Amino acid sequence: MEPIALSAALASFTEQWSPRIVTAVNDYDVRVAKVEGDHVWHVHDRTDEFFLVLDGELHISLREPAGERTVVLPKGSVFTVPRGIEHKPYAPAPTAILLFEPTGTLTVGDRHDDVPDHVDATTGHALR
């Protein structure tokens, strides 16, 4: 067990929307990802999804019972998308994020729109 520098973890890969698992906490993965542009509309039926913006700015569009809205997360902000809420992350410029989700959770959720080529539908990749 050694400390992991998030800057080194992020420097170890270039792929967008392709998270790397930096550690685990109980049955949860802590993942980092580089993101830019659109992700995909998706839903996690059984789990919340936690976002921390490490650098840049992340927008998350939400389709809630009261209607659609977008939250904007500047660097240093956190936001949790509740289970069952359809959402689509978007980064207007290169952004680095940290995610906290149960191990084995797909990045595109349990239900999703067609997955574009630039989005990696994965449960996370190990750090190199």
Image (cartoon, grey):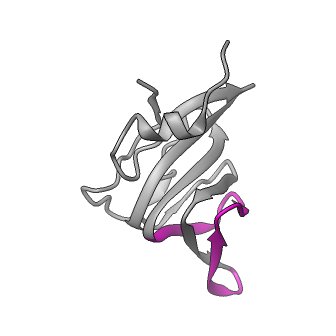
Q: Residue at x 43, y 70 (%)?
A: 93
* Left or right: 117, with 83 as reference point: left
Q: Locate the C terminus by quadrant.
A: top left
Q: Residue at x 54, y 65 (%)?
A: 56
In terms of depth relative to the viewer, which is nearer, 65 or 25?
25
Question: From the viewer's perspective, is residue 45 above or below residue 105?
Answer: below
Q: Is residue 93 magenta?
A: no
Residue stretch rendered in magenta on the structure: 65-92
In terms of depth relative to the viewer, which is nearer, 91 or 86?
91
Q: Residue at x 57, y 30 (%)?
A: 22
Residue 82 in which image quadrant:
bottom right
Residue 78 in which image quadrant:
bottom right
Residue 75: percent from the left, percent from the top? 64, 64
- Residue at the farthest bottom position: 67
Q: Does any portion of residue 126 appear in the rendered image?
A: yes
Residue 98: percent from the left, percent from the top? 61, 48
Q: Residue at x 50, y 34 (%)?
A: 9
Q: Does any portion of residue 20 appear in the rendered image?
A: no
In terms of depth relative to the viewer, which is nearer, 98 or 26?
98
Q: Is residue 82 magenta?
A: yes
Residue 117: percent from the left, percent from the top? 24, 56
| Magenta-colored segment: predominant secondary structure | strand
In terms of depth relative to the viewer, which is nearer, 10 or 119?
10
* Left or right: 97, with 14 as reference point: right
